[in-house]
Amino acid sequence: MVDPAPSKEDINYMLRAAVTAPDHGWLRPWRFIVIEGDARNKLSDLFVESLKKRNPEATAEQLEKEGSRPKLAPLVIVVCSVMTDEKPGVPKNERVLSAGAAAQNIMLAAHERNYGAIWLTGNAAYDPNVKSGLGLEENMDIIGFLYVGSVERDVKERKRPDPEDFTIYWK
């Protein structure tokens, strides 16, 4: 994906779609970190620094690849789940699923606005150094990095499985 990045209006549209995700208990268990422009260089440095800590034996090629991830698109939205103690009756998995639904809504809204969008995690999503570097609190986890930008070329649609292979009609 390439420039131009989504406009502020388009980013707000995507985030408004995100907060319509199902939300048991109205906990709003998601947070979004918008990273664009030169801020992607800071994220790149954080990814490289974190890989060095995870794997001191990382090769120059591995470090370069890790550092290139934030530059896959002109916009990165980090989607996080938040665990609070407000309503202990709401299971953790429902909060995580809500954050996942928020991420999916961002993806759908990006595509609706004719942007390309991909959702990636990788080791950085689970790295405590990345979490800390992004300013996340202990009760927050990264659900994914959403890469959004203008589409440079036609994207070949991925062959999808037949839903019938995964569906039971219960009677």
Image (cartoon, rainbow, N blue to C red):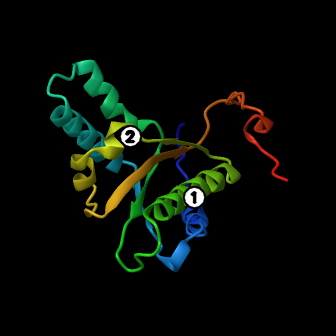
* Residue 38 visible in the picture: no
Residue at the spot 53% in from the left edge and 38% down from the top edge: 2
Tell me where residue 160 sits by quadrant.
top right
- The one of 163 and 57 positioned closer to us in this rendering: 163
Instruction: Count residues near mark 1 (Cα–Cα under 10 Å), then give few for <14, some for 14-19, many for 20+.
Output: many
At horizontal 55% and vertical 69% (from top left) the residue drawn is 19
Label 2 crowd bin: few (<14), some (14–19), many (20+), radius 10 Å? many
The residue shown at (40%, 75%) is 88
**Could you tell me the amino acid type at mark 2?**
Pro
Q: Secondary structure at mark 1?
A: helix
Question: Residue 41 or 134: which is nearer the viewer?
Answer: 134
Labels 2 and 1: the sequence-earlier one: 2
Amino acid type, residue under disc 1 in the picture:
Ala
Q: Is residue 137 left or right of residue 86?
A: left
For the residue pair 66 and 1, the one nearer the viewer reads as 66
Q: How many marks?
A: 2
Q: Judging from the image, what secondary structure is the residue with disc 2 in? A: helix
From the viewer's perspective, is residue 26 above or below residue 66?
below
Task: Give coordinates of residue 97: x percent, y percent.
Answer: 52, 58
Above or below: residue 99 compared with residue 5: below
Q: Which residue is mark 2?
A: 70
Residue 3 spot, x, y in % from top left: 52, 42
Residue hosting label 1: 101
Q: Residue lying furthest front in this view? A: 171
Report the residue at 36% width, 73% height from top.
84
Task: State whether residue 167 appears in this view.
Answer: yes
